[in-house]
């Protein structure tokens, strides 16, 4: 029996047809028509700084993030049109707009993905007070009732979570399988608007944005591009070496690059695990490197479990995800508010005078992406070496990262700042030790800080203040780059000893 009631599907970070239970739910409800809507947050086009970190509002989007969202919405719209449906994109208060549309088009109810972030949860709550709301789990590997233990008993550490999960689900085929994309969808409600409407059209202005080619990778938005990357990456030469290469800083294939599609919901983690399983079972049996390739590629599963853990932890923490003071005991020195705001601005601009940090911050601004290794380093530097509140860093990442995901971003920042559960002091990274380990020749830093290119390859590029004494030819050598680091940590010196014995004091500025 066909229903005569339309339904509304409210999409957020689930911009895909594949493995998306929202479509199944609409078909189960026998919707006569389907209105598919995405609402851009009110803060989307505001300048950065207009939303305080920790305030229950989403951060404004950088042009890069707007670009990625625009492409993902346009790609999905084309796919929906091919199934006889469409997509309506609005800008404003989602709670108000969704409720209004549901009433206006006589929708029987609204189907949406259960939100992880508190802002989105509040919006969903407000919609539920106006009409029937069906919230479904989507975009994660497990549903809440599939967790090894109830959410309230989520283990204190990732390791314990992983152990319990692996005991309950020892192999990839034990994980829930992805759903198929729908082959048809109910038609569009007559007279309902379609496409980008009103202020949502401002998103078109981000069309021109391009990631800096020094990032070695151009993200192509949309579900087909995400699936293509999945196929392209799952080969012995790439996935088969994942664990070995994942800590690198640059290159096209050292890590999967799935994060942007995952964050926008153009790729589902269940689809990734399913494809990973297929890849692993097709590795040639007598291949000499079979074991190594299997193990290396299996680390992709482990990283997806990190994502899963942060998601469930954010659901458990609710608004506390955004709260918590970082312990300042291992901050190099106490800092005044003026020093703190100068430090934050110089960190954001890639002008701290510590090339290892500045290169990362410049890459982030120019591409909207950063390797995990560099994310850890720049975050540790801000919080542990400069003594800046971790939430300032998390807010900047939220603004900039094309792959911003509320649980992964705020969870990783909390983790590095040592907030809440599982606090450990060893998340204070030594910048020079890290630089020596991951960029001994300084290729990465000179790529993003051309001012350093005049220095010979080697650790000198990580400590230019040693090579550029204050009184000789500095203007010509450094351009506008700071001549002295914003801070200098005692423990760096051991890793710089073979450059020069010059002693440097803390909080010298350029
Ligand atoms: P790969 O190394 O190929 O990993 C595969 C997938 O596993 C990733 O796409 C991601 O979904 C997941 N993953 C890997 N590492 C982590 C991790 N530490 N935490 C959670 N999931 C992980 N990741 C985001 O997706 N969005 C964020 O907003 C985000 N913010 C971060 C902020 C900080 C301070 C740090 C240290 C890490 C953050 N990460 C975030 C995690 C990680 O850095 C990125 O997921 C990864 O670098 C993305 O590149 P990739 O897809 O090539 O990752």
Image (cartoon, rainbow, N blue to C red):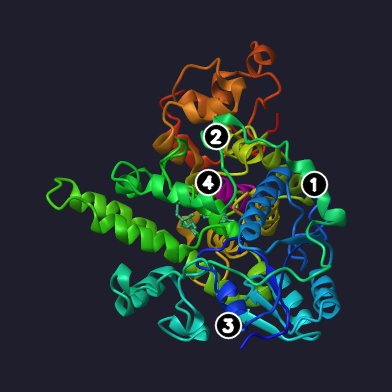
* Upstream in sequence: badge 1 or badge 4: 1
Q: Residue 327 or 217: which is nearer the viewer?
A: 217
Rendered view: 168 above or below 370:
below
**Viewed as shown, does residue 453 lie left or right of 179?**
right
The residues colored magenta run: 378-387
Q: Residue 270 or 100: which is nearer the viewer?
A: 100
Mark 1 → mark 4, Cα distance in angstroms: 23 Å
Q: Which dot, 2 or 1, sits closer to the camera?
A: 2
| Contact flag, marks 2 and 1 (Cβ < 8 Å) | no
Q: Judge the density around disc 4: few (<14), some (14-19), many (≥20) Cα neighbours within 10 Å.
A: many
Rendered view: 484 above or below 86:
above
Q: Which dot, 4 or 2, sits closer to the camera?
A: 2
| Residue 117 x/y as whole percent | 66, 70
Mark 2 → mark 1, Cα distance in angstroms: 33 Å
Residue under label 3: 28
Residue at the far left in the pictured view = 286
Would residue 385 be counted in the magenta stretch?
yes
At numbered mark 1, what does the secondary structure look like: helix, strand or loop? Answer: helix
Residue under label 2: 215
**Mark 3 CB within 8 Å of ligand 1:** no
Q: Quadrant of the N terminus?
A: bottom right
Residue under label 4: 377
| Residue 40 x/y as whole percent | 77, 60
Q: Which dot, 3 or 4, sits closer to the camera?
A: 3
Q: Main secondary structure of the magenta part?
A: helix
At numbered mark 3, what does the secondary structure look like: helix, strand or loop? Answer: helix
């Amino acid at each position: 029996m066909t229903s005569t009631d339309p339904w509304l599907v409210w999409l957020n970070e689930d911009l895909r047809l594949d493995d998306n239970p929202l479509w199944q739910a609409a078909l189960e409800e026998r919707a006569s028509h389907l209105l598919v809507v995405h609402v851009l947050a009110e803060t989307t086009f505001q300048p950065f700084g207009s939303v305080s970190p920790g305030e229950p509002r989403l951060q404004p989007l950088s042009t890069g993030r707007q670009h990625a969202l625009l492409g993902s919405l346009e790609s999905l719209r084309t796919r929906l049109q091919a199934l006889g449906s469409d997509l309506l994109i609005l800008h404003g208060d989602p709670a108000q707009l969704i409720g209004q549309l549901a009433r206006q088009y006589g929708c029987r109810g609204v189907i949406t993905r259960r939100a992880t972030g508190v802002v989105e949860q509040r919006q969903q709550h407000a919609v539920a007070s106006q009409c029937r709301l069906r919230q479904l789990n989507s975009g994660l590997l497990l549903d809440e009732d599939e967790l090894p233990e109830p959410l309230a008993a989520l283990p204190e550490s990732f390791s314990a979570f992983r152990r319990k999960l692996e005991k309950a689900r020892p192999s990839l085929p034990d994980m829930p399988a992805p759903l198929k994309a729908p082959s048809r969808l109910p038609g569009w409600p007559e007279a309902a608007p379609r496409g980008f409407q009103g202020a949502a059209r401002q998103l078109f202005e981000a069309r021109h944005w391009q990631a800096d080619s020094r990032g070695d990778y151009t993200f192509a938005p949309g579900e087909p591009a995400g699936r293509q990357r999945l196929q392209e990456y799952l080969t012995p030469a790439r996935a088969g070496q994942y664990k070995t290469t994942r800590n690198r800083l640059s290159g096209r294939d050292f890590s999967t690059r799935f994060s942007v599609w995952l964050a926008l919901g153009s790729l589902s983690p269940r689809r990734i695990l399913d494809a990973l399983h297929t890849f692993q079972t097709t590795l040639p049996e007598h291949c000499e490197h079979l074991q190594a390739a299997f193990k290396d590629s299996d680390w992709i599963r482990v990283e997806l479990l990190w994502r899963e853990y942060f998601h469930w932890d954010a659901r458990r923490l609710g608004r506390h995800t955004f709260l918590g003071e970082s312990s300042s005991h291992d901050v190099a020195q106490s800092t005044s508010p003026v020093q703190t705001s100068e430090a934050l601005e110089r960190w954001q601009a890639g002008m701290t005078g510590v090339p290892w940090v500045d290169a990362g911050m410049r890459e982030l601004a120019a591409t909207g992406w950063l390797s995990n290794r560099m994310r850890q380093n720049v975050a540790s530097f801000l919080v542990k070496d400069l003594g800046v509140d971790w939430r300032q860093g998390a807010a900047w990442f939220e603004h900039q990262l094309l792959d911003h995901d509320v649980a992964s971003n705020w969870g990783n920042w909390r983790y590095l700042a040592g907030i809440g559960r599982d606090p450990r002091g060893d998340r204070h990274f030594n910048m020079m030790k890290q630089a020596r380990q991951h960029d001994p020749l300084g290729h990465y830093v000179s790529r993003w800080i051309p001012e350093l290119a005049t220095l010979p390859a080697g650790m000198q590029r990580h400590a230019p203040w040693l090579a550029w004494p204050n009184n000789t030819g500095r203007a010509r050598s450094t351009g506008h780059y700071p001549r002295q680091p914003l801070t200098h940590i005692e423990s760096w010196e051991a890793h710089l000893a073979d450059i020069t014995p010059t002693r440097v004091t803390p909080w010298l500025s350029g």
